[in-house]
Amino acid sequence: MDRGGDEASRYEMARSGLLPNPLSFAGQRQSLIDCMEMADGTYGQLQFPDAKREMSATCEAFAEQMMRSHPHFGFGALVLARMAAIDADWPRFNAMLRLSQTGASTEQWVSVERLKLYTVEQSHLEPQTLVSRKADIDLLLASPVGIKSIARLYIGNEDLRTLIADQAETLPEDVQARFLATLRSILNN
């Protein structure tokens, strides 16, 4: 099945219960990336709740299928968390965020996406999920690549600023200095 030409086409396909199911793992992961983009993209944000739930059900079924063969697939669990948020299934949302953090604890790009989701739905986070959020922030602050991502989130998201600053202050001075230098660099460009 063709991936679809644009976000709207993919969204409407998903609403009707169709997602591409390529044979390769990379192709299957692309379908999950499309699910995240459909949930967070402009077209998806403009949809009525019923349309969002239809899209979510298709993406959820696809992610669950992938998780059966890869039970610790952190990105698959993240997609399930995002779909649970659409359905306001907060216990599943939290459980999938924790599973995602466990399964992809060192995959920085997944940590960045989790951090965005933690922030958007922060009022629904359970205490155990806050531990996962802290681990993601620590990972990104400690990594030369991740620090750039978390610095951009810090600059662009007021809700995250205090949280990131508080955690950064608990880290060694060299990490704090690197974070501040990264912030200055981004702000100066």
Image (tube, grey):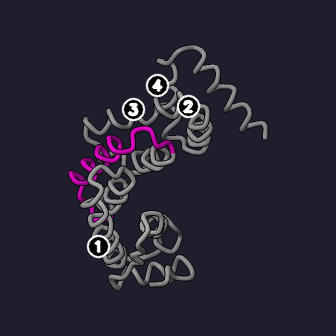
Q: Is residue 100 above or below residue 1?
A: above
Q: Is residue 113 above or below residue 21?
A: above
Q: Residue at x 33, y 70 (%)?
A: 56
- Which of label 4 and label 3 is nearer to you? 3
Q: Amino acid at mark 3?
A: Ala
Identify the mark nearer the N-term, 3 or 1: 1
- Which of label 3 and label 2 is nearer to you? 2
Q: Amino acid at mark 4?
A: Gln
Residue 169 lies, in percent from the top left, at 51, 19
Would you say the magenta stretch is mainly helix, strand or loop?
helix
Local crowd size for mark 2, using a 10 Å CA cut-off: few (<14), some (14–19), many (≥20):
some
Q: Is residue 14 magenta?
A: no
Q: Which mark is residue 143?
A: 2
Residue 121 lies, in percent from the top left, at 37, 50
Q: Alpha-carbon distance for marks 4 and 1?
A: 36 Å
Q: Residue at x 32, y 54 (%)?
A: 77
The span picked out in magenta is: 86-108
Q: Which residue is mark 3?
A: 135
Q: Alpha-carbon distance for marks 2 and 1?
A: 35 Å
Identify the mark nearer the N-term, 3 or 2: 3
Q: Alpha-carbon distance for marks 4 and 3?
A: 10 Å
Q: Alpha-carbon distance for marks 3 and 1?
A: 29 Å
Q: Which residue is mark 1?
A: 57
Left or right of 186? Residue 85 is left
Q: Which residue is mark 4?
A: 167
Q: Is residue 99 magenta?
A: yes
Local crowd size for mark 3, using a 10 Å CA cut-off: few (<14), some (14–19), many (≥20):
some
Q: Amino acid at mark 2?
A: Ser
